[in-house]
Image (spheres, coloured by chain):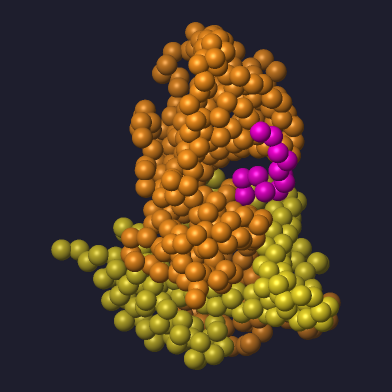
Chain colours: A yellow, B orange
Amino acid sequence: MLDSPRDSLTAHYLKQRAALLRFLVARMRNRDIAEDVMQDLYIKLTKANLPEQIDNPSGFLFRMAANLALDHIRKNERVRLRDRAWSDLNREKLGNEYLADAPHADDALIAKQRLAALKARLQSLSPKSREAFERHKFRGQSYKQVAQDMNISVGTVGKHLGKAIKHIMEANLENTHDI
Amino acid sequence: MNDNAATGEKINQQARAWYVRLGSEQAGADDWHDFTVWLEADPKHIDAYDRVELALLDISPQETKSGVLNNPVGKPEENPSDKIIVLQEKRRLLKPIPRSYLAGIAATFIAALALLFSANIFQSPANIQHYATNIGEYENIVLSDGTRINLNTNTKLSVQMGKKIRAVTLYSGEAYFDIAQDTKRGFIVNVKDTIITDIGTAFSVNFYESTLSVSVAHGIVDMQSPVQKVRLTKGQKAVRLSGAKTMTIASVEIDNISTWRDGVLVFENAPLSSIVPELNRYFKTSIVLMDEQTAALTFSGVLNISDQDKMINSIEALLPVRVMDDGRQILLSGKQ
């Protein structure tokens, strides 16, 4: 009988535990946080809705770990932004009731502006690179799917994505020093 | 360029290359091991990788299960899934239609049928294509004339490309239309007894629980209901509530039309009681509001609809709510 994806992932988790932890320590620059993320990963493994079939369980596990790590990093980023908003407000001596709300609007505005800037930036990208990027990032297509749909090789998909990311990041360098 | 800048750019290039390599579905334990070694080699490598990740943070793919739309489905099911909206009792908007309106409805309906018939007469029914998405799916179709239609979660529609007219029928759900100009053939969208006529434009149509809403991103559209005709221009939105005879028109921020196409929903000062039914359209596990105070909490911000866990995390971080997942539903209640 075939293992369920969950059983198979759990087996891989146990086998790859050391490698996963080593990756997380490097990624998070901190062993304690990395161990927390390992714990989160295990909980997620036992609870999350998993696809019916996982072709690459090791890759899937590392991807899950990387996403959880990113969640941590992004949460810290948000806390940092909120702290800044909080202290700005305190400096201006605004009423207490604004303290809790303003940072939310800040989050919303920043995310919205960034997404809009990113989309605007994509307009000046070559059409093929843009299509590959949109298919993979916005629509979640795998590299193989993108390659099939665009009738190009998987390697070319990677090249287009690399170009798109470089293009976006150059835009970021120009105008987001403040964020 | 000095040496530092050159080294910096080399590291950035490596970081991008890692991002692309690890984004592949083929990336395995070996790739991740090599990546770990690269991260360990220099803190600057981690900084550079952080910058790549953070630059792309605002986008995340919609979950799509491939295959559904590769073959247009047959006749759409009569009942759309009843699992999505759990707060139906909060939307008791049905009102009986007075008898005096029936004559007007009948007359317009006949006119509508005549319009459709004139389109149908040159087409065999075999030319009707049906498209559908399941809960959490998203699809993009391109018609033979170049018109693009994005289907949001749990949506059913059919397309008929006639010689005189291009006609879409939206049975349920939400779609965004970017219409290709064709001076010889108009484009209409039928939603129950309302006909939306395009005049070269992009707009979104949302039809859930018999409430119809149309938002215009570019150009002009005309809407004809049994008792009313309205013209909408860019940045306007018409809403016709379930059972209501007339439409109300409001302005809408163009950037906020159909943000689901980018995997996010944007809310501005909206109460959870109206946000949650909308969020529940995207996931099989429903969110349930446990008390009136929680339902009345307002939220402003961007929610990610491609990952329910992330979405719940954001709500939990931004609002004073307690989250309980009992495995079948996600319960939100007030914090003590």
Q: Residue at x 61, y 61 (%)?
A: B299
Relative to B307, say whether B98 is above or below: above
Q: Residue furthest bottom?
A: A31
Q: Is residue B225 above or below residue B274?
A: above
Q: Nearer the viewer, residue B65 or B205?
A: B205
Magenta part of the chain: B248-259
Q: Give coordinates of residue A76: x percent, y percent.
A: 61, 79
Q: Foreground residue, B46 or B69?
A: B69
Closer-to-camera residue (B88/B327): B88
Which image quarter holds the N terminus of chain B?
A: bottom right
Residue B330, compared with residue B72, is above or below; it is below
Residue at horizontal 41 percent and vertical 56 percent from the top: B286
The residue sitting at 45% across, 22% down in the picture is B128
- The number of numbered discs placed on residues in the rendered structure image is 0
Q: Nearer the viewer, residue B185 or A164?
A: B185
Residue at (53, 36) in percent of width and height: B211
Q: Position of residue A75 (x, y in %)?
A: 59, 76
Displayed quadrant of residue B78: top left
Q: Residue furthest left?
A: A1
Q: Is residue B67 left or right of residue B111?
A: left
- Can residue B47 be spotted in the picture? yes
| Coordinates of residue B20 in the picture (x, y in percent) | 56, 65
Report whether A56 appears left or right of A110: left
Q: Is residue B84 magenta?
A: no
Residue B233: x percent and y percent? 74, 32
Q: Is residue B200 visible?
A: no
Q: Is residue B256 magenta?
A: yes
B15 shown above or below B183 = below
